[in-house]
Amino acid sequence: MRRLFPLPAPSATSPDGTDAAAPPPGPTDREWTLDELAEAYAYPAPDDPAYARRGGWLRANMVSSMDGAAHHEGRSQPLSGDADMRIFGVLRALADVVVVGAETVRQEGYRPARAREAFAARRAAAGQGPAPAIAVVTAGLGLDFGLPLFTEPLAPTLVLTGAGAPADRVAKAREAGVEVLFAGEGLGVDPARVAGVLAGRGHTRLLTEGGPRLLGQFAAAGALDEMCLTLAPVVAVGAAPRIMNGPAVPVPERFALASVLEEAGFLFTRYRRS
């Protein structure tokens, strides 16, 4: 893996006029440790003005083919690769909660996030449990609460819905031991309220893995703080949606490029809200 942006700072000059020891100029292709990836993808510090202003941080992680497909035949795995999966694991290991849409849960066969020994000390120091919780966004609560996602998590799986969700389905979820949180007054969630509801539970480092419709809703509501986008060196064609799907926003919102990594032709980009 090599860093393409930002490049290392120019080497300093020692008092005798010679260059002091510094990393070689330009990107160096080598294997990154998990700790290095965790540092590269660390959430903003609590005193970061952008973080403090919003009371939390919602980042997205998505993969896209060269021709803009968000998945192939309903699943993102065919677009992924070894380095993409390493970064996927690191992003989960840094998060308090992984927010995901119900349709993505069904299509991808979501299971509980697992604890990873490599991140145990880092999570403990940050006051986090051994693994992030999964928060499923759903309007109708058409979920199988007997699946391992709900019966075997290290951190209890949450369900995010609106106050107008079917009362019988809400009751069924709670009977199964699932915590249901309301983040909207209608049938479904108000995407602008999700981060605040989770922050009220002490979850401020948020990661969403989509799918495209949910991510589009977050973006349209101005709730997305950071986009981690993997560009895969593959062409999918087909009718798969883009990584965001939904009505056009009145004015395209600009994000600032924060970093670019590369491995085996995959580009791992990270953009922050300007």
Image (cartoon, rainbow, N blue to C red):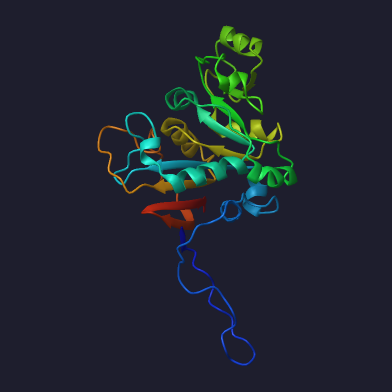
Instruction: Say which of 82 and 258 sits in front.
Output: 82
Furthest-left residue in this view: 237
Q: Nearer the viewer, residue 223 or 86?
A: 86
Question: Where is residue 229 shown, x and y percent of the image?
Answer: 44, 47
Q: Is residue 192 above or below residue 188?
A: below
Q: For residue 142, say whether it is visible.
A: yes
Furthest residue to the bottom? 16
Please state the horizontal and vertical placement of residue 182, each as a whole percent of the image.
62, 22
Instruction: In this rendered view, identify the residue nearer to me: 58 or 132.
Output: 132
Q: In the rendered image, is residue 185 in sight? A: no
Instruction: Work out whether 239 lies above or below 251.
Output: above
Q: State the image quarter where residue 241 is shown.
A: top left
Mark count: 0
Q: Residue at 46%, 48% (x, y): give it.
A: 83
Image spot of residue 123 (x, y percent): 69, 43
Residue 193: name its quadrant.
top right
| In this view, 178 is above or below 67 | above
Q: Position of residue 184 (x, y in %)?
A: 58, 24
Q: Is residue 170 left or right of residue 216?
A: right
Residue furthest to the top: 168
Above or below, 25 against 179 in this view is below
